[in-house]
Amino acid sequence: MKSLKLKLILALVITGLATIALVAVTASWLVNKRFNEFAMDSAFSHFHEDVTRYIGQYGSWQEAARFEPFIAYVQRTRSIEAGNLRFPGREGFSRPPGPPGSRPFPPPGGRPPRAGSFPPATSFQPPVDEARPNPGPGPRAPFRFMLVDSAGVVMLGAAGYGPGDTIPESVMKETRAVTVDGKTVAYAHPVGLPNLGQDDLARLGVIKEALSYGLLAAVALALFLGLFLGHRLVRSIKELTRAIRAMNKGDLFQKVNVHSQDEVGELADSFNKMSEDLHHAYQKLESSNRTISHQAEQLKELSIRDELTQLYNRRYFNEHAARMHSESTRYGHPLTLVIGDLDHFKQINDRFSHAVGDKVLQRVGRLLKETTRDSDVVARYGGEEFVIAYRETSLEKAVQLCERLREKMESVDWAEIAEGLDVRCSMGICSNTALGSYEQMLADADQKLYQAKDQGRNQVCY
């Protein structure tokens, strides 16, 4: 089971159903228990009334037992109240006039009936409420009360105890007192469970039916809440998952909606704060990286550029000239190297000062950048010397470019720098890649430069 949503819904639903089942079982047990308690109280009330009348009729339990067994007395009095009493050998005798039960037998003040004049106790059934049907799938054992005196001696037997037997102390603790005129005359102990009447069973059925409907409603509610809460909880987790995946792809600034104030809500809020902090930290890091990259570029430029003229320095030129010579000899492409020198530059420094000489070098550097291509490499080689590497350029083309450079240098208004200042240059060219290395080509170009110097300066030799 990989779906967290399904797991949460099942957990919520199973928990809800288990709780509902537990409540239903407990409620049913409590209802049955209370009904049995009510029935027990009602049965004891009737039994207490029968015992009270029985003792009151004859004066004492022992005296009453001599004339009429208690069970026979109960059956007779109930028959009198029901209006259908008949005695053997007393044809036509019926209950005394008056309301049922209003005149006990024999009449008050009269002589007690002769002993043995009533049917024996064995011909009567125990005083159970036979009008009440037994609930449940099977019949209950007959319910009755066992009566004992204060010493635990059985007066009215039940549950295997006969008259004269003594019950255990544990059973004695479960008895109820039977009082006559405020005095305790005996103790009653229930045996079995009381039978419920039709009214009790009807009420119990209504209650259980209501519990069943409530159970169904609770099950439906548990299913609904399980689906609702599970979907709501998983929705928040799905938002967090989506945001985390977006962050994993590089989009660090993510914000999820906070739907609650519980642990998931706190998690979402913490995630939003973390995402915002990461976004700000990433922005700062990017800014720092840009600064570092810019500084690295500056350092790199400083390492390969001449500070005064902003031309490439000698080390940079040597590295690229070697690579260009290797490519030229491998693929047979033309390559021309030029070395130039400013004429009489020492006299310029001596006459106009080194500051003027520096300005002259700066102006020459700008002029070299303006007259060369991006694919060419131009550098200050030392002092007033400069070198140019013309990629993919023949000797004839290189001569044209150098002549144009020389002419432009002549046309510069050097008086802007210093009155009476005039700057010229001489250049030597080599395009013979067969010499073996760029160093040998530069040496050959340097020889051409000295040739230009010897021939009067301000010229290009090749």
Image (cartoon, rainbow, N blue to C red):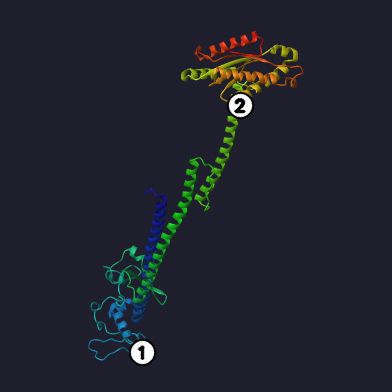
- Viewer-closest of 129 and 345: 345
- Picture quadrant of residue 394: top right
Q: Is residue 61 at all visible to an observer of this figure?
A: yes
Task: Give the residue at mark 2.
Answer: 298
The first of marks 2 and 1 along the sequence is: 1
- Amino acid at pointer 1: Gly
- Viewer-closest of 263 and 421: 421
Percent position of residue 64, x then y? 31, 79
What crowding class fits label 2: few (fewer than 14 Cα within 10 Å), some (14-19), or many (20 or more)?
A: few
- Amino acid at pointer 2: Gln
* Label 2, label 1: how far apart the Cα atoms are: 130 Å
Percent position of residue 69, x then y? 28, 78
In what element is the residue under mark 1? loop
Percent position of residue 33, x then y? 37, 67
The residue drawn where x is 45% and y is 55% is: 231
Task: Give the residue at mark 1.
Answer: 98
